[in-house]
Image (spheres, rainbow, N blue to C red):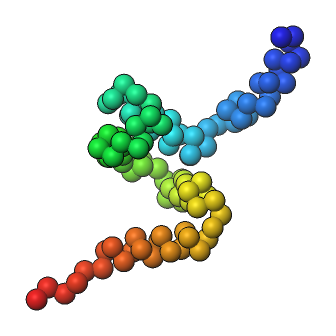
Amino acid sequence: MNISARIAKLERNEALTGPPTVLDRYLAELDSVALRLTGRRWQTIAADAPLANLVSEKVKEFLRGLSDSDLAILKSDLERIVFRGDTAARDEAYRAWLSSFSAEPVE
C-alpha cells in the first residue's frame, strides 16, 4: 500500500479525528471491565445475563464520574442506537420504566 493510500485510510478513521466521544469512552469501559472480569469482550457476554449484570454493576462507577452533560449525551446516543429514531417506542419504554417505580399502597 502506498503512502497516500495509507494517509487516506487514516483520515477516514474517526478515532483519529479528535478526542473520543462519551459513547466511545463508555464502550471502551464496558470492554475493559468485561475483559478484566471474564477475559472476554463485552460483545461476547452481553447476551449472558449474569455476566452482563456483573459487568454493568462495575461500570456504574464510570457513569457516576460523568458530568450531567456527558450523561445526557450518552443517554441520547444510546437511545438513538436502541430505538433507531422511533420516538414513540422510546417514550413508551420511558413510561413503562417510570411505572415500575410506582408503589402500590400498603394495606
The answer to whether residue 81 is above or below residue 19 is below
Q: How many marks?
A: 0
Residue drawn 39% across the image and 51% down it: 64
Image coordinates for residue 52, horizontal then vertical, percent: 36, 43
Using the image as rendered, state which of residue 79 and residue 45 is in the foreground: 45
Asked whether the viewer can see residue 93, the reply is yes
Residue 47 placement, left or right of 3: left
Residue at 46% x, 50% y is 66
Q: Quadrant of residue 96?
A: bottom left
The x, y position of residue 75, in whole percent, is 53, 58
Q: Is residue 17 above or below residue 4?
A: below
Is 18 above or below relative to 53?
above
Does residue 29 show up? no
Left or right of 78 on screen, residue 53: left
Horizontally, residue 54 falls left or right of residue 42, namely: left
Quadrant of the image containing the C terminus: bottom left
Q: Which residue is depicted at the point 50% across and 56% down?
A: 71
Q: Residue at x 25, y 80 (%)?
A: 103
Residue at the extreme front of the image, as rendered: 47
Q: Position of residue 1 (x, y in %)?
A: 83, 11
| Position of residue 83 in the picture relative to residue 29 (left or right) | right
Point out the residue furthest to the top here: 2
Nearer-the-camera pick, 19 or 13: 13
Q: Position of residue 56 (x, y in %)?
A: 36, 46
